Image (cartoon, rainbow, N blue to C red):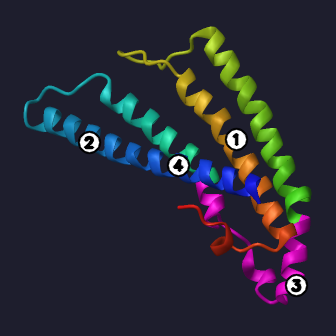
Amino acid sequence: MFLIRIIDGLNEVVGRVVAWVAIMFAGLIVYDVVLRYVFHAPTLWAFDLTKQLYGFYFILLGGYALRHQAHVRVDLVTDKLSSGLRRVVELLGYPLFFFPFAWVFAYYSFHFAKLSWEQGETTYGATQLPLYPVKIAMAVAAALLLIQGVSEFLKLILNKTEENTNVG
């Protein structure tokens, strides 16, 4: 189905691009440690920027993780069920649990980001970095997670497997 391929492809691209952020914040940490302990001249901004990059990295990979079934699941009960019954439980789980959570996350993170943008919110400390980019990333991540949930739900309805919809 075209919609599934688009959503899966989008989260695949986002996941692969965001993975490079880990290299950026690891490099910043090494840079700051070298400055601090070798040259005795720590930066005022590296710690805050590293936290923000880690926030981008962690939050934006939610849709990618869902696409690859990497989220924590409660398999204790479902492992004992037949594949048909497990599918029914998963079909019920999306509208009963996932979609309400994802919608609340998207709704509130959008308003959270909007308020931060309007206020020009910054970090505390010697270097005041803008906070709204991270909060905007939360809203984007919530949207990516929500649409990936739609893709996963459609796959269950259409009885598609990961191999049938893999675009990467």
Tell me if residue 19 comes above or below residue 88 in the rendering: above
Mark 1–mark 2 contact, CB under 8 Å?
Answer: no
Q: Which image quarter: residue 46?
A: top left
Q: Residues within 10 Å of mark 1 (few under 14, many from 20)?
A: many
- Give residue 13's mark: 4
Label 2 is placed on what type of residue?
Gly
Query: Which residue position is annotated with label 3?
Result: 84
Q: Is residue 111 above or below residue 63?
A: above
First in residue order: circle 4 vs circle 3 = 4
- Percent position of residue 102, x then y: 78, 46
- What residue is rendered at 34% in x and 32% in y? 47
- Residue 10 highlighted magenta (yes or no): no
Mark 2 — residue?
A: 27
The span from disc 1 to disc 3 (Cα, nearest Å) is: 30 Å
Identify the amino acid type marked 4: Val
- For disc 3, the neighbor class at 10 Å (few under 14, some 14 to 19, many from 20) is few
List the residue tagged with mark 1: 142
Say which of marks 2 and 3 sits in front. Answer: 3
On the image, the x and y values in percent for residue 92 come to: 92, 66
Verify whether residue 74 appears in magenta: yes
Write down the region rendered in magenta.
64-92
